[in-house]
Image (cartoon, rainbow, N blue to C red):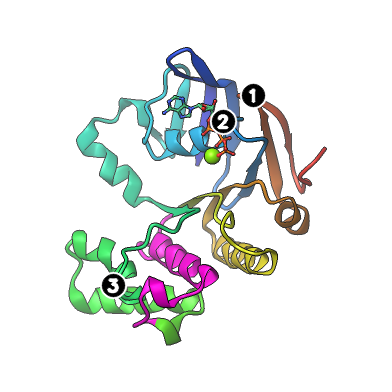
Amino acid sequence: MIRFLNVTQKYGTITALRDASFDIDIGEFVFFVGPSGAGKSTIMKLIYREEVVTGGMVLVGRVDVSKLKPHQVPRLRRRMGIVFQDFKLLPGQSAYDNVAYVLRALGVAPTEIRKRVLGALKVVGLIDKVDAKPEELSGGEQQRVGIARAIVNGPSLVIADEPTGNLDPQTSIEIMNLLEQINQRGTTIMVCTHNQQVVNTMRKRVIQLSDGNIVRDVPLGAYNA
Ligand SMILES: Nc1ncnc2c1ncn2[C@@H]1O[C@H](COP(=O)(O)OP(=O)(O)OP(=O)(O)O)[C@@H](O)[C@H]1O
Ligand SMILES: [Mg+2]
């Protein structure tokens, strides 16, 4: 599903990733851990082509993302759902509209939109909050909307960069359990996190970065070696 082959990512004189290679299969759940500046977000950004790889190769499915022309990038991103630390919801708009937004932009038929949006909000347990605006929701609920938005188009991959960074420990575990539930339906999940408790509770594959290097890649791992 995802293949990094000897990826070196430079930002000017800074090397954010050094000769990084790993494979992620369809249906895996992988945590990326490591200190601030280790290169975790860089990995995510290369996958959704926010950054263009400066050395080596990044494959998403059969697509070499560095070869995509700018007009092909939206099609790549439609195959994945992206979840952010700060939720990135549209203020003043209902949970429903926040989730429907992408489908409307794609020109999906209204009855289909309704079916898919309500389905996604049901998965995240927010069917009673369809009309609530972000300002009226707790942080955990806002992140649930963010996850509903990420899965509404039926992506094969969900990537989440520090999805529990703004949440308390109990809510963090609930959000991770939700991602696990989505994973159990066959969606590949990649999560960057500093949250030791979450990683140690979930026991998934852990890829640890340090100063741009992959220093550990273990199945059913813990936050620390
Ligand atoms: N656009 C950019 N321009 C210059 N340097 C950058 C850019 N993006 C990231 N970097 C640098 O690349 C390195 C890796 O950054 P990255 O954001 O991948 O780290 P991270 O592991 O996600 O950290 P954090 O846990 O703080 O989110 C850091 O040294 C960072 O300062
Ligand atoms: Mg980061």
Q: Residue drawn 53% across and 18% down?
A: 15
Q: At label 2, which amino acid type do we have?
A: Gly
> Residue at point 69% right, 35% down?
208
Q: Amino acid at mark 3?
A: Asp
Q: x, y percentage for residue 97? A: 28, 72
Mark 3: secondary structure: helix
Is 133 left, or right, of 8 in this rendering?
left
Magenta region includes residue 146: yes
Q: Is residue 7 visible?
A: no
Identify the residue under disc 1: 211
Q: Is mark 1 within 8 Å of ligand 1?
A: no
x, y (%) of residue 104?
21, 65
**Residue found at the very far top of the displayed protein:** 13
Viewer-proximal residue, 79 or 216?
216
Label 1 close to label 3 by CB (< 8 Å): no
Q: In the image, residue 201 lies at what x, y percent?
A: 76, 59
Crowd around label 1: few <14 · some 14–19 · many ≥20 (10 Å) = some
Which residues lie in the magenta part?
130-156
Q: Please name the residue shown 31% across and 26% down the image.
A: 67
Distance CA(mark 2)–CA(mark 1): 7 Å
CA gap between label 1 and label 3 equals 40 Å
| Residue 205 highlighted magenta (yes or no) | no
| Residue 124 place in picture, x, y as percent | 50, 73
In terms of sequence position, does the residue under pointer 2 or pointer 3 come before the other?
A: 2
Label 2–label 1 contact, CB within 8 A? yes
Q: Residues within 10 Å of mark 2 (few under 14, many from 20)?
A: many
Q: Using the image as rendered, state which of residue 191 and residue 68 is in the foreground.
A: 191
Q: List the residue tagged with mark 2.
A: 39
Which label was assigned to residue 97? 3
Asked if residue 150 shows in the view, the reply is: yes
For label 2, being within 8 Å of ligand 1 is answered: yes
